[in-house]
Image: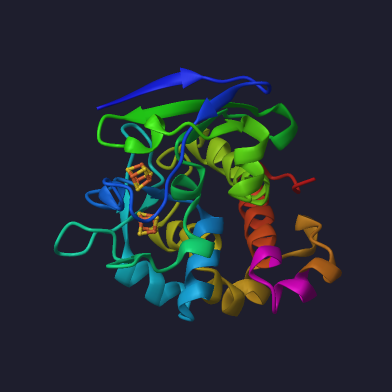
Amino acid sequence: MANEKLLNAHSTFTFDCHPGISCFTDCCNDVEMTLYPYDIIRLKKRLNIDSESFLEKYTSMEFDEGVWFPHVTLKMAVNDACPFLTSNGCSVYEDRPFSCRSYPLARSVKRACSPENQEAKYYLVRHNYCRGHEASRQWHLSEWVDKGDLNIFNEMNSHWITIYTILKSYSFEATGMNVNFFRLLFCAIYNSDNFRLLMDSCLTDEMNISNELKEKARSCDIHLMQVGFAFIHYCLTGESLK
Ligand code: SF4
Ligand code: SF4
């Protein structure tokens, strides 16, 4: 069970999490965690594997009710623990997913088709088993955001929210989209190494994706993600992504 409290920009809260605390790694078992495209870029680089291998080994596809496009979740190991959990704690700590690094904060975003119109709120989440809330160490919201390096994740995730907002409102059946196109969209979002191979055959001049961005995307996953999002935006709206 968890309860949540809405925070504002000036909010403070008390929390501390460290090896030695009695609940250490309790939160890394039986976790239902969405992985965002940027999480996958960080994790597959950390593990030094390609996106296809990462998706196959560590993720599942989940469909929200009424939504035709899936999101990706972290698959637990056979013992129901996070696959990155070791006896010493998190083995991917510096590149852990957004949900892990932001806890005990959760970020809720009002979806919109452009990052400028997305309203974000932070909540303080309290699980009964988490002893970190009993600590006296006080944090300002902005301190926790800085500590977790959350701003880069927030920026990357805001582009994904733009695309997900469009995908959610798009009717798969009405347009007669075929399975191959569905796979291509999935690849452009989550399977960056495969999309890099397909990129040149997918992009057209009408999409207005600059040659500079395309060149950077050949070696940089973040730029490749931007190209993938621009490709999807054009395919679903007929307009280039600004
Ligand atoms: S204090 Fe909370 S976040 Fe830290 S290990 Fe314990 S349960 Fe997990
Ligand atoms: S990624 Fe790390 S912090 Fe997150 S659940 Fe797994 S082991 Fe825990």
Measuring 84% from the left and 64% from the top, which residue is drawn there? 210
Estimate the x, y position of residue 236 in percent, counting from the top left: 60, 45
Estimate the x, y position of residue 214 in percent, counting from the top left: 76, 71
Q: Quadrant of the C terminus?
A: top right
Q: Where in the image, quadrant-wise, is ligand 1 located?
A: top left
Estimate the x, y position of residue 17 in percent, counting from the top left: 42, 46
Measuring 67% from the left and 51% from the top, which residue is drawn there? 152
Q: Which residues are magenta?
A: 214-223
Estimate the x, y position of residue 33 in percent, counting from the top left: 35, 47
Would you say residue 37 is visible in this rendering?
A: yes
Mark count: 0
Write down the quadrant of residue 219 in the picture.
Answer: bottom right
Would you say residue 176 is visible in this rendering?
A: no
Write down the quadrant of residue 196 in the picture.
Answer: bottom right
Is 132 in front, or is 94? Answer: 132
Q: Residue 85 vs residue 160: left or right?
A: left
Q: Residue 219 vs residue 53: left or right?
A: right
Q: Is residue 218 magenta?
A: yes
Is 16 in front, or is 159? Answer: 16
Location of residue 176 with respect to 194 vertically, above or below: above
Is 83 in front, or is 169? Answer: 83
Q: Residue 219 vs residue 69: left or right?
A: right
Q: Quadrant of the N terminus?
A: top left
Q: Residue 38 vs residue 27: left or right?
A: right
Write down the quadrant of residue 112 in the picture.
Answer: top right
